[in-house]
Each structure stands twice: as C-alpha cells, then as structure tokens.
Image: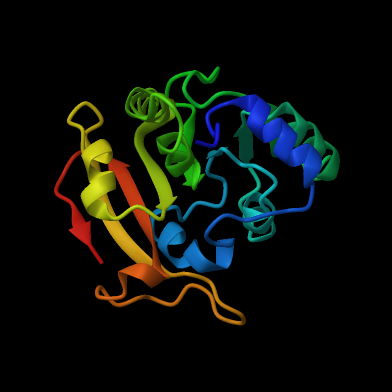
Amino acid sequence: MAQYGKSEYWDERYTRDPEPFDWYQRWSGVRDIVVEHVKAKAANILMVGCGNSRMGEEMYEDGYTQIMNVDISMVCIKAMQEKYRDKVGMQFQQMDMRAMEFPEGAYNIVVDKGTLDSVLCGEGSTLNVQKALAEISRVLDSKGVYVCISHGQPSYRLTYLQRPEFGWDVKVHTVTKPMMGQQGAVATKEDKDNVHYVYVCVKGGGETQQN
C-alpha cells in the first residue's frame, strides 16, 4: 500500500519528480461548476493537498487572487513558494489537513482535488477522513462551500460527506476525464468509467442532488 498519508512519501515523490502534475482535472475542467457557487473573485480560498498542481495558478489568472495552498510535503511547499513568489495573495504553507492551523470560519471555499481520495488510500482511512472533513467544516464560514473532485462514485463518497454533523447540502456533478484537446464536457450517467465526480458541499443542510 502506498503511504499516501505520510509526508515522507510525498517528499520523496516531489524530490524525484518536481514537474507540475495535475490529478484528475485542470481548472478548465471544473470551472463552470465552481464559479456557479463562488461568484466573488475576492473569496478567501483554501486549496488542501495542493501538490505542485497548476490549479491554483489557473484560478489566480482567472481572477481569484486570495488563495491559501496547503500540503503535507515541505519539499513541495518550498518549491511552490519559490515558483509563485511574485503572485501576491497566493500563499503556500506546509500543513496536515487533519489538523489545520487556521481559525474557525476563515475561508469561503475549500477546494480538494484528489486529496480525500488519497487519504482514503492510506492507513486508518476512515478515521483520517473524518478528521480531515471535520477540519474543512471548521475552517469554512457559515455559508462556506467545499468542492471535492474525486474518482469515487457517490455510493462510496456520500457516506462521508453526508454526515449530519457537517450539515452540508451536497450536489453531485460529473465531468468527463480529460482527453487530448477536450476538457470539462458533461458526461452521461451511464459512462461511469470515464468521469470524475465533483461534490459541491454547501453549509446549511439539505438534500443531495445529482446533475
């Protein structure tokens, strides 16, 4: 089993392969879904498990300039701090999403691209996911939005996201997996092997909807 929950695993990986890598989707693939819920460009955004993805950079270039990026790997964070030192408002901190150092209600939106999936692949996955989601809920403001981009189908992921203590209104979207020259097209429900799921969790409670 890959030690996805351990900083040593990621430090070694980013040392070995420092080139930018995006899990699942680029910003263009999920943009329409996210902006539907986050219209204010001045929103305080937290990117958990940022890695060396270009997602934050692409959101920044799209006008979202208040982005805090956290990752468990110090190797990754140091490289990203250096790379983006000229982008004011684009910050990077080494942090474990299961125990974040931010005050309650500090963020309007939390973006998670593959990080929950990564935690679920590690040891003690159920407890670690509960810790991570509790932290995400804590740092979101009263109308905050958690966007989780995942390969996991609703039958597996909603078990975690619909826990009553979060009180999230969860909407499930599907986007096709990126192919050459094509990103972000809406997939059909039947084509489960060719999609990623975007779970939009809004504080305030309600029923799950699938689009």
Q: Is residue 25 shown left or right of residue 84?
A: left
Name which residue lies at 38% across and 56% down. Answer: 198
Q: Report the residue that reaches farthest toward the left.
A: 207
Above or below — where is 9 with respect to 177? above
In percent of width and height, residue 164 lies at 17, 30
- Who is closer to the viewer here, 40 or 168? 168
Q: Quadrant of the C terminus?
A: bottom left
Which of the 4 quarters of the picture holds residue 125? top left
Q: Is residue 81 shown left or right of residue 71?
A: right
- Who is closer to the viewer here, 2 or 174? 2
In percent of width and height, residue 156 lies at 26, 47
Q: Is residue 153 shown left or right of residue 42?
A: left
Q: Report the residue that reaches farthest toward the front.
A: 1
- Who is closer to the viewer here, 42 or 138? 138
Q: Is residue 85 shown left or right of residue 156?
A: right
Residue 51 seen in render:
yes
Count of all numbered marks drawn on residues in the image: 0
In percent of width and height, residue 178 lies at 53, 72
Which of the 4 quarters of the picture holds residue 32? bottom left
Above or below — where is 157 with respect to 21? above
Which of the 4 quarters of the picture holds residue 145? top left
In percent of width and height, residue 9 lies at 65, 31
Q: Tell me which colouring the rendered structure shows.
A: rainbow
Residue 204 seen in render:
no
Name which residue lies at 40% across and 37% down. Answer: 120
Name which residue lies at 64% across and 61% down. Answer: 62
